[in-house]
């Protein structure tokens, strides 16, 4: 019996060249209705996008998160950052999340989906969790973005813990936060298309209703 596939060890990943993600000039911050509508048109045109969310961390026992504070959608050449503090963009966010025509692809989205349900009162449609995609390929343990990028592109996806635990509820996000959020989603869409090239697309993008 052949062994189950496993991601490369962290020591090997640490020696790889850095994954070239999106730059600031490719990141679009959505802060009003007109920008939201423009972003929505671009995203819907893509049909499939990388997706992730960020929330201000909670540090006190029993403290409930009010996230997601940031929702990021990425195509192969641009990322759109929505912030929930801009209430007038919520209808567009809801439309994107509900759309069955926009595949939203990410890693380990179960926690994100719970927060979306609490914040927006809906269950997003057309969600593809890449964790499940890798399990279908024989990986027993969850494969995160770092491991997936290393396996498929032989590159190292950098993630800063200080940015991960930063204040995502801030009205003005820092450049480091924007790059982090954008490239989380960008990594997902890159992995999605790389997997499509290595196996029949139907295995990854078939009946979205069965992904959850």
Image (cartoon, grey):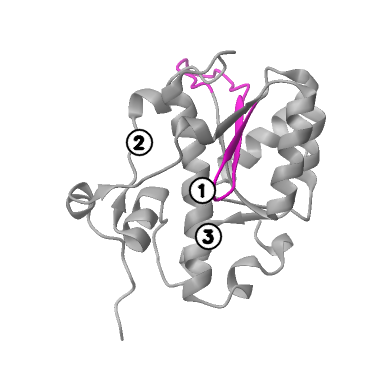
Q: Are marks 2 and 3 in contact (CB under 8 Å)?
A: no
Q: Is residue 156 above or below residue 209?
A: above
The circle drawn on residue 35 is none
The residue indicated by pointer 3 is 192
The residue labelled by disc 2 is 159
Q: Nearer the viewer, residue 20 or 13?
A: 20
Q: Are marks 1 and 3 in contact (CB under 8 Å)?
A: no
The 10 Å Cα crowd at callout 1, few under 14, some 14 to 19, many 20 or more, is some
**Frontmost residue, 120 versus 200:** 200
Q: Is residue 87 among what the camera can see?
A: yes
- Under circle 1, the secondary element is loop
Question: Separation of disc 2 and disc 1 at Cα?
Answer: 16 Å
- Report the residue that reaches farthest toward the front: 25
Q: Earlier in the sequence, mark 1 or mark 3?
A: 1
Query: Can I make out residue 121 in this image?
Result: no
x, y percentage for residue 11?
A: 17, 50
Query: What residue is shown with label 1?
Result: 108
Nearer the N terminus, badge 2 or badge 3?
2
96 in magenta: no
Q: In percent of the image, x 61 and y 56: which residue is there?
A: 128
Foreground label between 2 and 1: 2
**Residue depicted at x 64% and y 41%:** 113
Q: Depth-wise, is mark 1 or mark 3 nearer the camera?
A: 3
Work out which quarter of the rendered image holds the C terminus and state it.
Answer: bottom right
Disc on the earlier residue, 2 or 1: 1
Which segment did they paint magenta?
56-82
Which residue is situated farthest in the bottom direction here?
Answer: 1
Q: Is residue 192 above or below residue 118?
A: below
124 vs 171, nearest the viewer: 171
Helix, strand, or loop for circle 2? loop
């Amino acid at each position: 019996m052949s062994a189950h596939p496993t991601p490369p060890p962290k020591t090997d990943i640490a020696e790889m060249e850095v994954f070239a993600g999106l730059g600031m000039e490719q990141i679009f911050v959505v802060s009003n209705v007109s920008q939201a509508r423009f972003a929505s048109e671009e995203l819907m045109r893509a049909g499939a996008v990388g997706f992730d969310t960020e929330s201000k961390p909670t540090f006190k026992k029993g403290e409930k998160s009010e996230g997601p504070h940031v929702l990021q959608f990425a195509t192969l050449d641009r990322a759109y950052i929505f912030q929930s503090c801009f209430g007038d963009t919520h209808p567009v966010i809801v439309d994107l999340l509900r759309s069955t025509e926009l595949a939203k692809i990410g890693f380990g989205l179960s926690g994100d989906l719970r927060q979306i349900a609490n914040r927006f009162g809906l269950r997003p449609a057309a969600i593809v969790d890449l964790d499940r995609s890798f399990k279908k390929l024989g990986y027993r343990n969850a494969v995160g973005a770092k491991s997936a990028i290393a396996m498929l592109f032989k590159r190292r996806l950098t993630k800063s813990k200080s940015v991960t635990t930063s204040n995502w509820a801030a009205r003005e996000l820092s450049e480091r936060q924007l790059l982090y959020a954008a490239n989380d989603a960008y990594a997902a869409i890159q992995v999605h298309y790389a997997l499509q090239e290595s196996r029949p697309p139907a295995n990854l993008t078939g009946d979205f209703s069965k992904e959850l």
